[in-house]
Image: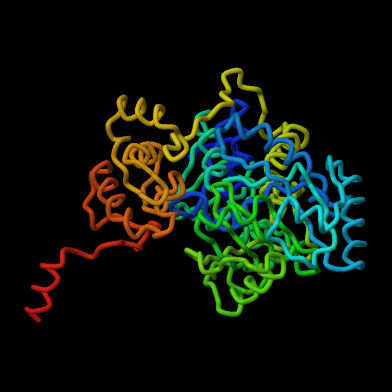
Amino acid sequence: MNYDIVIIGSGITGASIARELSRYKLNIAVLDKASELPAGASRANSSMIHGGFDDKPGTMKAKFCVPGNKLWHSLKDELDVHVDECGSFVCAFSDDEIKHLELLLNQGITNGAPGLEIISGDELRKREPNVSPEIVAALWSPEAAIINNFEAVNAMIESAQINGAKLFLETQVTGLLLDDKGNIRGVATNKGDFTAPIVINAGGTHSGEIASWAGDSSFKIIPTKGEYFLLDRVAGTFITSFLFSCPSKAGKGITVLRTAEGNLMSGPTATEQEDPEDRATTPEGLAEVLKGARKLVPNFPVNMNITTFAGVRANTESGDFEIKALSKPRGFINAAGIKSPGFTSSPAIAKYIADMIKEEFADRVKLIPDEKFIPERRNIPRFLYLDMDERKKLAEKDSSYAQIVCRCETVTEGQVIEAIRRGARTISAVKMMTRAGTGRCQGGFCCPRVAEILSRELNIPLDEITRHGGESKLLVGKTKEFLLKKEAK
C-alpha cells in the first residue's frame, strides 16, 4: 500500500495533522491500533481548551497553546464541534499563591493570551457561588473553553477522510521500513506494509518507543495516569466554568469543571507508572481527586457520581512537547510527548508540521494545495438539543429519529444508524459518536438496543458485536444453548 504520508496514531494530534495535510494533493494513511476513536489520552482527559498562561515562555507548549486556542474558536463552527466558551479560574488560597497567579498572568501576557485578569475571591464567588470561602483570589482567563473531546477527534478525522485521507483502525505499527540509504520507506504493521517517504509519529504514550525505532533516544515518555469522577448532568449547574488550583511540579492539579455536555467532573491525579495501557482507577487516586475537588468546591456532590475513569498521558522528562524532524532516517517526524495543553495545541501543531514538510522535505513530497478541499464537516444531529419543531421535522424525514434508544442522553435510532454509516463498528464507537451510554445508567438501558442495531446494520450475528473490538464480545451465545451444553457435561 503506497502513500505520500503515513501518520502513526489518530488521537487529537494525529487526527489534526491528517486534516491539515488533507488540504493538499496527498495520499495520506492514518494508522491506529484502536477499534474506535478517540482512544488513549484523547479519550480520557479534562477536555480543556487552555487559555495559554500556564506554559513557560520559550517552550513548545507556549509556542502552540495560544494559536491552538484561537484556531479552536474558529474550528468549532467549521467542524460543528460542541464547545462551551466558559472561561477558567486558577484559584489562590494564600498570599504566596497570589504571587503565583501574578507569575501566570505575566506568562500569559508574554505568550499572547488575551483578557487575563486577577480578581478577588469575593468576585469569584459572585460568579461561582459554590467555590470555597477560603479562596482569596483567582486568575480569570476568558478565552479558555471546554470542548466535547469525543466529537473533536472524530470531527478532525472525518474532515480528513472527506478530503481523501484513509483511516485504518485495528492496525498496529510494528516497525519502520528503511530504504537502502537508511531513509524512511514506510512502516510495517499487523496488516501489511504501508510505504511512504514521510512517517509522522503521533503515537501518544507509545511515541517514545516509536521514536526509538528511528534511533531517537533524546527523550523518554513517562506514562502518567490521571483519575477522574464524572457526575450526573443534574449536578452541572453547580459550577459553570473550569476551576484550577495553583499548579505544582506534578501538574495543574485537581480541577473541577462542567463538561461541554453539562456534566460535573473532577480530576486528574498525576501518577507515574510503567504500563502505558493501565487505565484502572484506584481507591487512593479517587480519594485524592475527591480531596482536591472539595478544596475548590466544599460541597462537591460526589453522591451524584455516575462513573469513574482514568487516562494515561505522555509526559516527558523535559515536560515539553517533542516536535522535530530527524536528520536520519530522513523522512521521520516526531509529534511526541503531547500532553496538556496538547488538545488545545493540536491544530497549531498540525500547521507547524505541514510547514515543516514544505520546507524540509520538498525533495520527498510536494505539498500542492487542493482547490477542492472541503473545510466544513457536519456532526450527527444532536437530537437532545433540538427544539420540538426541529425534532418533528427530523422524524418526519426519517422515522428512525422518532425512536429513542438512549433515554439518559435522548439519543435516537437514527443517530445510531448514522454513526454506523460513518464507520462505527463497536458499542464504544457508537458511544463516542452519539453519546449513547454516557448518561446516568452508563448504557444499562441502551447497550442491548445499540447492539441489535449494530447487528442489523452490519449484517453480522449479535454475538459478534464487541464493546471495544477484539475479543470484547458482549455475548457468548444463547442462554438456552449454554444451559443445554452445561447439562450435557
Residues 15 and 206: in front is 15
User: In the drawing, does residue 183 fall left or right of residue 61?
Assistant: left
The part of the image, by quadrant, that contains residue 115 is top right
- 227 shown above or below 338: below
User: In the drawing, does residue 150 fall left or right of residue 266?
Assistant: left
The quarter of the image holding the C terminus is bottom left
User: In the drawing, does residue 336 fall left or right of residue 30?
Assistant: right
Residue 85, x across and y down, in percent: 67, 41
Residues 297 and 176: in front is 297
Residue 142, x across and y down, in percent: 77, 43
Residues 241 and 126: in front is 126
Residue 411, x across and y down, in percent: 38, 44
User: In the drawing, does residue 414 fall left or right of residue 379?
Assistant: left
Residue 364, x across and y down, in percent: 68, 35
User: Which residue is drawn at the image coordinates 66% and 60% (left, top)?
Assistant: 256
Q: Quick one: which residue is furthest to the top in this view?
A: 371
The part of the image, by quadrant, that contains residue 400 is top left
User: Which residue is drawn at the image coordinates 49% and 37% (left, top)?
Assistant: 166
Q: How many marks?
A: 0
Q: How is the image coloured?
A: rainbow
- 185 shown above or below 231: above
Residues 29 and 386: in front is 386
User: Which residue is drawn at the image coordinates 91% and 45% (left, top)?
Assistant: 110
Q: Quick one: which residue is furthest to the bottom in this view?
A: 489
